[in-house]
Image: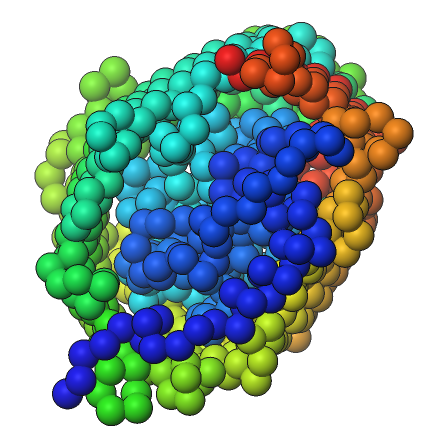
């Protein structure tokens, strides 16, 4: 067997292409691609072209981020769980990354603001609270299930701010091989990468305003130390609070993070700690339309149909330690390990009106929650690259595990809701609650302990100078769910179970040219199916594990100035059905939802100074196995058949540093019931903005002023629907002004 890194065996044609492009487009070549691309180059400046960093120096599989595309807003690749960071052109999967520069330029406060750039993702609100949830390829991903640095169980609960993040990376498709089992995430995964200190010191302060009265301030400081800049420190602070566009809706965010890293000849390590607290007071949750047979017209975007006494406080402490060590030179053998966790405490009183008639009459309900969770997760493994004859190999062997303990007590108004109206809402008395889910509300007992663990083995085989890459992998996943009686703290055997299963994954990439990749894959996913619902014979008993499967084919392109992809996919996910016989109901995994779709994605700078990012997704979200076949062939709840986004930026040549921005988002109609009798209308929103970048103090310091107006036309619409427990509609955001100023010392 001959051991030799494949990258050392040949000269990539793209390197020559990059040198030619540097000569023809010197301004582009000089713009930094990986640190935000904020440098303004004057016509009289001398342009110095350097060799680093580029996609040709990128080492796949580790923690080194995929280089950003052109202006630094989008990366054509991202993290694939335990398989590490990968360029999209070299893997048979759909993966893309959005950078901190895009976050800053678009004044994106949360992950939902960022994923609005991707037509394959629909952001909506969680049932009963203010959580951000996402539908990727038509299937739900809870915000709690996102990963950070490829590690699960670290991301703060429900809503994550963007201040400390360098990348928001989106993997589309079933991802059990890379990330193991999760509560959600059949259609894809979102990974968050924290900021790291860069070679150029940064001291950035910023202030921001969001209508109607939210004011915020932030600080971002990064330094490297040591003879070779091997030590790095990055600190981020944020505080923002005030009223939103909705009447009497006040929110507050506090975040603090520190990231330490070390880059040695063989050892690379990082340590991150973070604290985040989100507070919502009087904010709107969903409207329950379970008992009516129509879709109400949406209230005014500024109208608050909730109650002032509704609130939610979510506090998180989180952190992770990661290390890589090269056991052999030239990345021939590298050991990696990571350990992380978080403590989360959510306490709140929620109010969701239940609609009664078309006039907007409703009842104001109440849900009290006190939830405490502690999660620990880790992974470790070896990755290697070598040749056997004419075949190159990239092998990864690893183990990952996660353990979560949850303490929950909750209560809700039961039969004593207060009358209200969603169009003419007035203050109502807070309904009394009947306590369920635990009698010790101030100090809840343990209600659940969940543990997942699994072994991963994968090999990417390359032939014909790696123009053909075959990925073969499998993961043995074990899921252990233990339930406890919330009133006594004793284990509940009917709701506890343990299952394990192998999940194979295989895919192939063929690159007829350096700029084009054809690919196909088969991937799978696991998630707990939960327990049987009330009114069934097997109420409270485990329903086992949902085992979903995906097949996908597509083509990707990267021409240096523009890139994109086309993908066709099919995902089959089992679902729970409740059958009734002899007046007895029984729940089991007998249903199925099948989503077939086409995704288009394009980004780049076709003309110097004009940057584009857009895409479209068509999905056929068919329910193929339903109760008694009554709804077979109908659309799944809350999945639009068509979504599209088109964003553009234009550097105005007459004013140096001035850029105009715009984005159009379109979401097609979607059904709000299994029988497809209630449909939410399609909607289109327009966002416009400007930013002005200037150099101060003889080009030593930089100031950037940004102004944006979201939903310019103040479109009134329902943004989505949730069917977790009943049918809830969520209203879209009205016209919102955002303004910010950042200053780099």
Residue 536 drawn at (x, y percent)? 37, 57
Taking the image as shown, residue 47 lies to the left or right of residue 186, namely: right
Q: Which colour scheme is used?
A: rainbow
**Residue occupying the point 26% across, 25% down:** 225
Q: Quadrant of residue 4?
A: bottom left
Q: Nearest the camera: 302 or 607? A: 607
Taking the image as shown, residue 534 lies to the left or right of residue 623, namely: left
Q: Nearest the camera: 288 or 121? A: 121
Taking the image as shown, residue 687 lies to the left or right of residue 258, namely: right
**Residue occupying the point 30% across, 38% down:** 154
Q: Name above or below for residue 503 compared with residue 417.
A: below
**Residue occupying the point 33% across, 45% down:** 149
Quadrant showing the N terminus: bottom left
Residue 237 drawn at (x, y percent)? 42, 16
Query: Tag count in the figure?
Result: 0
Q: Nearest the camera: 661 or 418? A: 661
Taking the image as drawn, is residue 294 in sight? no
Q: Quadrant of residue 716?
A: top right
Residue 518 drawn at (x, y percent)? 56, 80
Taking the image as shown, residue 58 lies to the left or right of residue 290, namely: left
**Residue occupying the point 36% across, 83% down:** 462
Taking the image as drawn, is residue 87 in sight? yes
Q: In which quarter of the image is residue 255?
A: top left
Residue 301 drawn at (x, y percent)? 77, 25
């Amino acid at each position: 067997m001959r051991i030799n890194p494949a990258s050392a065996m040949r000269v990539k044609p793209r390197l020559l292409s990059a040198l030619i492009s540097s000569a023809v487009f010197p301004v582009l070549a000089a713009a930094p691609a990986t640190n935000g691309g904020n440098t303004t180059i004057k016509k009289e400046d001398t342009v110095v072209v350097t060799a680093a960093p580029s996609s040709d120096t990128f080492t796949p599989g580790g923690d080194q981020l995929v280089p950003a595309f052109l202006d630094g807003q989008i990366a054509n690749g991202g993290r694939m769980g335990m398989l590490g960071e990968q360029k999209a052109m070299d893997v048979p999967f759909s993966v893309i990354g959005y950078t901190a520069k895009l976050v800053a330029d678009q004044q994106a406060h949360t992950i939902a603001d960022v994923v609005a750039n991707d037509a394959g993702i629909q952001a909506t609100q969680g049932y009963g609270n203010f959580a951000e949830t996402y539908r990727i390829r038509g299937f739900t991903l809870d915000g709690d299930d996102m990963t950070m640095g490829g590690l699960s169980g670290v991301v703060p609960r429900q809503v994550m701010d963007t201040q400390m993040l360098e990348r928001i990376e989106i993997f589309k498709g079933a991802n059990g091989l890379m990330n193991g089992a999760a509560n959600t995430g059949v259609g894809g995964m979102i990974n968050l990468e924290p900021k790291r200190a860069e070679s150029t010191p940064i001291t950035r302060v910023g202030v921001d305003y969001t209508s109607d009265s939210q004011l915020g301030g932030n600080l971002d400081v990064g330094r490297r130390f040591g003879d070779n800049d091997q030590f790095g420190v990055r600190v981020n602070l944020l505080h923002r609070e005030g009223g939103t566009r909705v009447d009497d809706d006040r929110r507050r965010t506090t975040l603090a993070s520190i990231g330490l890293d070390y880059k040695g000849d063989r050892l690379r390590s990082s340590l991150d700690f973070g604290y985040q607290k989100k507070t919502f007071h009087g904010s709107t949750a969903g409207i329950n339309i379970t008992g009516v047979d129509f879709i109400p017209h949406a209230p005014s975007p500024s109208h608050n149909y909730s109650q002032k006494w509704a609130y939610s406080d979510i506090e998180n402490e989180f952190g992770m330690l990661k290390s890589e060590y090269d056991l052999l030179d030239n990345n021939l053998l590298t050991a990696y390990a990571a350990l992380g966790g978080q403590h989360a405490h959510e306490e709140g009183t929620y109010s969701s009106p239940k609609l009664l008639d078309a006039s907007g009459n409703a009842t104001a309900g109440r849900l009290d929650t006190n939830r405490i969770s502690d999660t620990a997760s880790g992974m470790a493994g070896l990755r290697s690259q070598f040749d056997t004859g004419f075949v190159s190999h990239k092998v990864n062997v690893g183990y990952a595990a996660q353990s979560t303990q949850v303490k929950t007590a909750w209560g809700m108004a039961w039969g004593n809701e207060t009358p209200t109206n969603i169009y003419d809402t007035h203050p109502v008395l807070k309904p009394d609650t009947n306590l369920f889910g635990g009698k010790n509300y101030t100090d809840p007992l343990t209600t659940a302990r969940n543990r997942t663990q699994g072994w991963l083995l994968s090999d990417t085989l390359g032939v014909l100078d790696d123009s053909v890459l075959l990925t073969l992998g499998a993961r043995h996943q074990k899921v252990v769910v233990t339930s406890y009686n919330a009133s006594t703290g004793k284990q509940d055997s009917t709701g506890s179970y343990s299952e394990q299963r192998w999940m194979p994954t295989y895919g192939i990439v063929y690159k007829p040219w350096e700029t084009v990749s054809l690919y196909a894959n088969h991937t799978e996913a696991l998630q707990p199916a939960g327990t049987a619902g009330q009114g069934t014979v097997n109420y409270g008993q485990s329903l086992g594990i949902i085992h979903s499967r995906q097949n996908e084919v597509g083509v990707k392109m990267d021409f240096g100035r523009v890139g994109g992809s086309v993908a066709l996919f099919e995902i089959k996910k089992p679902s729970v059905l409740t059958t009734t016989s002899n007046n007895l109901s029984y729940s089991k995994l007998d249903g199925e939802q099948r989503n077939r779709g086409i995704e288009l994605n394009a980004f780049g700078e076709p003309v110097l100074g004009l940057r584009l990012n857009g895409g479209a997704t068509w999905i056929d979200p068919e329910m193929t196995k339903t109760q008694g076949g009554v709804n077979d062939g109908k659309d799944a709840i809350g999945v639009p058949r068509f979504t599209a986004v088109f964003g553009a930026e234009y550097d105005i040549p007459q004013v140096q540093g001035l850029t105009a921005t715009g984005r159009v988002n379109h979401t097609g109609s979607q059904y709000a019931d299994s029988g497809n009798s209630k449909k939410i209308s399609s909607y289109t929103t327009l966002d416009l903005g400007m930013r002005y970048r200037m150099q101060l103090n003889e080009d030593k310091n930089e100031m950037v002023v940004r102004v944006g107006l979201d939903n310019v036309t103040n479109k009134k619409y329902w943004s989505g629907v949730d069917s977790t427990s009943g049918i809830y509609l969520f209203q879209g955001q009205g016209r919102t002004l955002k303004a910010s100023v950042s200053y780099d010392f």
